[in-house]
Image (tube, coloured by chain):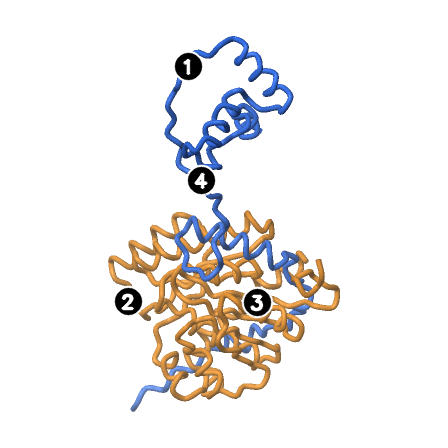
Amino acid sequence: MTPSQGEATEDVGMAVLALASAKGGVGKTTIAVLVGTELALEGYKVTLLDCDLNQHATAFGEKAGIRGFTVVPSIDEANVLSALRRAETDNDVVLIDLPGGSSTLALKALQRSHFVLVPCQASLPDVRDAIKTVAQIDDAQDLSRVKIARSLIWTRVLSGYESRSARHVRESVEAKRLPMFSAQLKELAAFRELHITGQVPQQIDAKSSAALNVSAITTELLANLEKLAVAA
Amino acid sequence: MSAKPVLPSLDGDLAPRKRLDLKAIKPSAADDESVSENSRRIGSEWGAQTSLPSAPIEQIKPPLALASLRIEVPEYLDRELALKAAEQRVTKQFLVMKALQAAGYRLDEADLVEDKRKVKARRKV
């Protein structure tokens, strides 16, 4: 096997993070963009591979112009592995924004990821698809024999109110003791506006609730990556 | 008198994030071929969308309908057939069928098997 086929080399190292869920509209792109830019603003070199047909991350990347944050568009099943290899050589973090639905594109990306974040709203269809995604991560891990760390994260959470059904779904999932971020992605207008302005909350007001929300998620993600770095 | 605005949280200032050396995390060592094969396998179990070519499927022919034909022949003919079959490592049935084919009866080449016992033995391995 040659390094070009994916062999680990001494001088190449970085974290590959995938945002995955069989369900669409759960916040994969939002988290990918927010975490990617947050890390870039802190000095990490970040590349986001946009695998979603909708290419919303790419559109944001064209507006944003944040130093150290690059979005690679039009990643598909045929070019995902080579794109990952290219990104691995010159970044601290590679984020993969995967499309909804089950696809071999996602399965390829999962096998090359160190950590998979599975966004999930507190509704049964979201949870059902998130659990399915976790099962696919398990299958990918079993076949590739490489540990793929993963965690669910609650998304689009309303501040100050939780419906009866949302609480029921959340408590049912938490009872299964799946890895779960304690930070949640809130439902905030700032996360919609970034696609219009090309600016993330940290750039507009670092003390805003949106910026603090992103900071909390990024902190938890980095804590998980630190465990991986220590174990490596 | 208007209420004073709530002061922002100091959480970010009081818990600064240290810089991690993410270069310590190495890329996966799995080669592209195994990753694609694994994806195909898992994808087929989960009904995943794919543009990967499907794994080759062995062409399985439907079993040939057979009929039994019992005939009586002179002993000298049977002996000659047995000798020829042993020499050629085929069956007497093969020699009779080949003779019928040569006489103009329809017999597809695929159905003309030298020794069916050898085929069955290969399938068992």
Label 2: how many Cα within 10 Å (few below 14, some 14–19, many 20+): few
Residue at 41% of width from left, 73% of height from top? A53
Are callouts 4 and 3 both on one chain?
no
Foreground label between 2 and 3: 3
Q: Are the two marked residues, 4 and 3, in contact with CB atoms closer than 8 angstroms?
A: no
A180 up-or-down from B60: above or below: below
Residue at 58% of width from left, 15% of height from top? B80
Residue at 67% of width from left, 72% of height from top? A89
| Quarter of image, res A186 | bottom left
Foreground label between 1 and 4: 1
As measured in the structure, the alpha-carbon distance from the residue carrying label 1 to the one carrying label 2 is 90 Å
* Residue designated by label 3: A222
Q: Colour of chain A?
A: orange
Which quarter of the image is occupied by the C terminus of chain A? bottom right
* Amino acid of disc 3: Leu
Furthest residue in direction right, as rendered:
A10
Are callouts 1 and 2 both on one chain?
no
Secondary structure beneath label 2: loop
Q: Position of residue A138 (x, y in %)?
A: 50, 50
Chain bearing mark 4? B
- The blue chain is B
* Residue designated by label 4: B60
* Residue designated by label 2: A161
Label 3: how many Cα within 10 Å (few below 14, some 14–19, many 20+): some
As measured in the structure, the alpha-carbon distance from the residue carrying label 2 to the one carrying label 4 is 61 Å
* Amino acid of disc 1: Ile
